[in-house]
Image (tube, grey):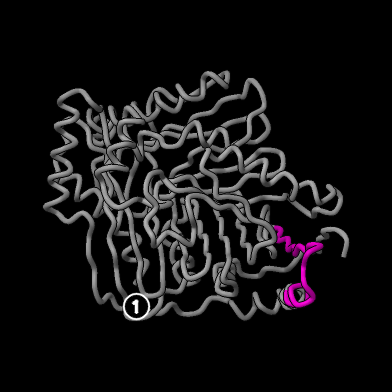
Amino acid sequence: MSKCFVLHKQIDLPDTNALPFLVERSSRAVYWENEQESFVGLGVAAAVGPVQDGLTSLAAQAAPFFASFSEAEQGGPLRFFGGANFGGLLPKYWADFGPSCFVFPRLQLLLQNNRCTARVFFLPQDTDSQRKYWQGQWENLEQTLQEKAPVALRENTLQQQSSSPDTNRWEELIGDILSRIQRGEAQKIVAARQVRLEFARSLSAGEILSRLRAFLPACTVFLFKTGASCFLGATPETLVRKQADRVYSEALAGTAPLSCDRTAFLADTKERQEHACVLDHICGRLRPYCENVRAPDVPALRELSHLVHLCSPVQASLKADMHILRLAELLHPTPAICGLPVNKARTWICDVEMAGRGWYSGPVGWFDAQGNGDFRVALRCALLQGRTARLYAGAGIVQGSQADKEFQETETKLHAMRSILG
């Protein structure tokens, strides 16, 4: 074989609930689903990263691979999927993912506009055994989808749990943040918790994805699986999307239980101030590069299965072409998951908070050969490794915040994933 080539076909998909279980068939897998599409990718045809100098350089790494396929033979969009570390120390249990990694899956299924397209990619350097393996996966794909039709999801028994920081350390951290705010060193800092859960049996990525889809249908459901580690979640927050010269982002800040008084929540001074800080930051970062930056005067309510957020969509038009990776660099991290000023808040998080967030609250998503893409903020997520799950949640601390109430906010955010894990 002297060049890359693609096989592609339309397939009948009678039940989309079968899609999550495909990720069990490979040690490397990607899952991405939202209101625009459902995507499953198995294996790795190409990978880019990690990088130490920002996400933008990944585009140059990916360019030769994109160029190896002619437009006529692509059979659909060519995209790398992946994510990056929030920043700072990367704990050893995140080693399988590294500071950043994006992959181009070998076998791909894309469900869009009620059409399911399957593709498999073959490379010049493939060995005979690799070609034979992926040819077999391709030929058996429809049968595999039938075999992986939904099954009754098994219960799992929680055996042990721990929290970092614990409640005492949490109070100390919130006190430290409030002192910094009082001294004028910061306006807001987002403090996060990690909860480690140990279960009786190994956690099934397919089962958990299936539950996420059902429990949080208004979110972007994502999964990145590599080796013995799996990072997955259902995030409500868009970091940035780009299509040609159109840019979309959103401010998602301000949180209350679903049972809250909506009128009181919308009128809450603390919540509105926190939301306004995030919205001003996003618009301010976009204005040097965009025109017609638009956002509503009053935030809307974004309701999830257990929470309600204040949400303001942002739209803009690029003045000159810019890669989605550069836009993601500009906007990450937003004050919603970091604080203000961003640099000072990020320093506190990396130096004081805990032993590193890993990909939690980092950018996850995809980019294509034209520089378009879709990036979300990795929230409502878990890192799975065997019988162990690490869950993450944060709360924005501003003047007037109370440690016990902010701790309860993180508990509310953790509730969905705790329930889904069994």
Instruction: Give the image quarter of residue 200.
Output: bottom left
Pick whichever, 323 or 152, lies toward us: 323
Q: Callout 1: helix, strand or loop?
A: loop
Q: Is residue 373 above or below residue 290?
A: below
Q: Is residue 312 magenta?
A: no
Q: Residue at x 77, y 72 (%)?
A: 127
Pick whichever, 94 or 368, lies toward us: 94
Residue 107, percent from left and from top? 69, 65
Q: Is residue 376 above or below residue 327?
A: below
Pick whichever, 172 or 414, lies toward us: 172
- All told, the count of numbered labels is 1
Left-right relation of 26 to 209: right
Q: Quadrant of the C terminus?
A: bottom left
Q: Is residue 132 magenta?
A: yes
Residue 255, percent from left and from top? 29, 42
Q: Which residues are magenta?
A: 115-133
For badge 1, the amino acid type reads: Asn
- Asked whether residue 256 appears in the rendered view, the answer is no
Q: Residue at x 83, y 60 (%)?
A: 5
Q: Residue at x 64, y 66 (%)?
A: 43
Q: Is residue 12 above or below residue 253?
A: below
Residue topped by disc 1: 156
